[in-house]
Structure formats: C-alpha cells, structure tokens
Image (spheres, grey):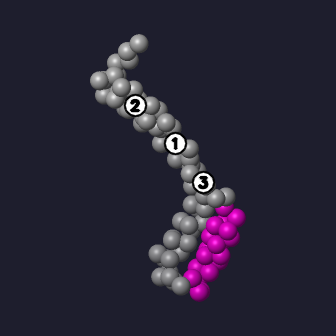
Amino acid sequence: MTVHIAKVKVRPRKNLPPSVCAVELSNMLGCWAATGDMLASNQCQAAAETLFQCMRTAPVRGKQPRSSINYHLARLGRNSK
C-alpha cells in the first residue's frame, strides 16, 4: 500500500491561555508611568503588593504536549519516495 503525500504540513492551533495577573500587572505599570515610582516604595506600593500576591498564588503552567502529526507525516513522506 502506497501513501502519496505531497508537501503536507499540519500546524497546531495556537490557543493562547488566559493571561494570569494581567490586570494587576497593567495597574502597576500604569502607576509607574503616572508617578515614576519604579522602586514601588510610595504610591505604587499597593499595586506592587497585589501583583506580588497574584503571582504567588497563580497556577504554574507546564508545557503543553506536542502533537506528533508532523513527525508521522514526515516519516510517511520519507518512506514513499
């Protein structure tokens, strides 16, 4: 049985995970831009603390398992020549 595959490549969908702590980060960056308090010692201390607490409790994302479809298509393409 011969399988003919002519330059077929399947790319996985890029599903972006929901951004964790994005609101807190934007609040802190906005505070820095407004006040220039880069050390978070005065006005931006509350924003920095909320970001710190969010990052501390955020779930750790592992690597997504990769699909093996491209590997198998390449393997079939090598064998059919």
Residue that label 3 marks: 62
Quarter of the figure with the C terminus:
top left
**26 vs 65: above or below:** below
Q: Amino acid at mark 2?
A: Arg
Residue that label 1 marks: 66
Quarter of the figure with the N terminus:
top left
Label count reads 3
In this orientation, which residue lies closer to the viewer: 70 or 10? 70
| Residue visible at 39% across and 26% down in the picture | 76
| Residue visible at 67% across and 58% down in the picture | 59
| Residue visible at 65% across and 76% down in the picture | 49
Magenta segment = 40-58
Q: Amino acid at mark 1?
A: Arg
Q: Mark 2 or 3, which is nearer the eye?
A: 2
Q: Residues within 10 Å of mark 3 (few under 14, many from 20)?
A: few
Residue that label 2 marks: 75
Q: Position of residue 42 (x, y in %)?
A: 59, 86
Q: Position of residue 66 (x, y in %)?
A: 52, 42
The stretch drawn in magenta includes residue 54: yes
The stretch drawn in magenta includes residue 49: yes
Could you tell me if the residues under marks 2 and 3 are in contact, i.e. CB atoms within 8 Å? Answer: no
Q: Earlier in the sequence, mark 2 or mark 3?
A: 3
**14 vs 52: above or below:** above
- Mark 2–mark 1 Cα distance, whole angstroms, equals 17 Å
Main SS, magenta region, reads helix
